[in-house]
Image (tube, rainbow, N blue to C red):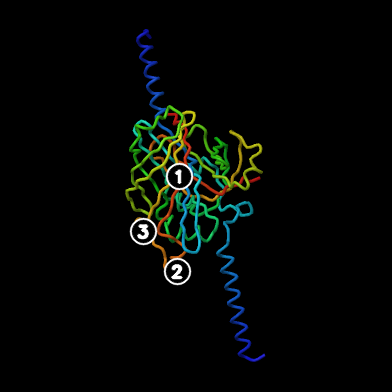
Amino acid sequence: MSRRTTIIIAVLLLIAAGAIWGYREFTRVPASLTDLDADHTVDAVSLIKEFTTNDSLAGKKYRNAILAVQGQVKSIDSSGNFYTIVMGDTSDMSSVRCSMDSSHFAAMSAGIQRGKAITIKGAITGFKKDETGLLGSDVELNRCVVQQ
Amino acid sequence: MTRKGILTALLGIMVLSVSAQDKFFTKSGRISFVSKGLIETNSAAHKSVTAVLDSKSGQVQFSVLMKGFEFRKALMQEHFNENYVESDKYPSSTFKGQITNNGDIKYQTDGEYNATVKGTLTLHGETKPVEATGKITVKGGKPRLQSDFNVQLSDYKIGIPSMVKDKVNNTVNISVDCSLEPLKS
């Protein structure tokens, strides 16, 4: 094989590899959290306290993290086919709100009820400070799955 | 306690109860947006919108955490948060407004009412006036707020890199759908 042919084949292979990588990257869907490890494991009440004490510090600590949050179920909110499990102290208006991954919720929701202690894994999206004084402040997670 | 005292206390409780029923809220509202580019359409949805409505005054407020928007494509979600809305720098977006025809909406009577809201939208650190039309559906004493409106990304200083100009439209259509519950204080 001549040197020129080798170079052409190498360039074509590089272009093909780049195109495959580009296509896979372009069509990549957000990963399910089921198989990913949590960056932090924390209980719901402590997590709320960290944010209400110093939301800037807590925001930096948990930025873009996957959290495994342990705690009691305060309520399950539903809107159409979407479910949010609300965790924390029932005597406190502030909560950890876990927007559930709908593809997993149906299979995992059995037995989840108010007062039950569970662990939920989710991607933190931030802290919503209550400015009205009527609603309570919330730490929000999405793409959540129930950790068995 | 005298009869007059008991009556005054009861009236006080009734007034407080009525006042509490003026306010409605949700923390599980939905907002989605669609950007129709020349080559492809990008869309995202948010399922954790906080909305508060004071039916007496017609004041309404919505807030979302930007990182809560979910895209079908991970790459678009990453670009949205890192390059467009800069979610770490500007973590939330809020709309505060007033229903201009609030007097036409009978919150105690089931029905569908057209509504117009005027207010300000804060996004990417920029606050701009927004006016939108929508409908309020009252069922069983609970209002559901729905609206569609457009925003221009350039108004909020959200730049579109020239490489993806054909994928991302400067005009984004936003849909809001929030079913509210009475706020018990």
- Marks 2 and 1 sit apart, C-alpha to C-alpha, by 30 Å
Check the residue under mark 1 and report the chain it is in. B
Is the C-beta separation of discs 2 and 3 under 8 Å?
A: no
Q: Quadrant of the N terminus of chain B?
A: top left
Q: Residues within 10 Å of mark 1 (few under 14, many from 20)?
A: some
Q: Residue at x 44, y 34 (%)?
A: B112
Chain of the residue under the numbered disc 3 shown in the image? B
Whether residue A25 sits left or right of residue A48 in the image: it is right
Q: Quadrant of residue A16?
A: bottom right
Residue type pointed to by label 1: Val
Upstream in sequence: badge 3 or badge 1: 3
The residue that label 1 is drawn on is B176
Give the side of residue A71 with respect to residue B83, left or right: right
Q: Position of residue B49 (x, y in %)?
A: 46, 43
Binning the other alpha carbons within 10 Å of mark 2 as few (below 14), some (14 to 19) or many (20 upward) gives few
Instruction: Tell me where residue B61 appears, x and y as whole percent.
Output: 39, 41
SS at badge 3 = helix
Q: Which mark is residue B154?
A: 3
Instruction: Specify the subunit that label 2 lies on.
Output: B
Q: Amino acid at mark 2?
A: Met
* Mark drawn on residue B38: none
CA–CA distance between discs 3 and 1? 21 Å
Looking at the rendered structure, the number of numbered marks drawn on it comes to: 3
- Which residue was labeled with disc 2? B163
Under circle 2, the secondary element is helix
> Type of residue at label 3?
Ser
Please tell me which residue is depicted at 48% across the width and 37% down the height of the picture.
Answer: B179
> Residue A101: percent from the left, percent from the top?
58, 47
Give the CA separation, mark 2 to mark 3: 17 Å
Q: Is residue A32 left or right of residue B133?
A: right
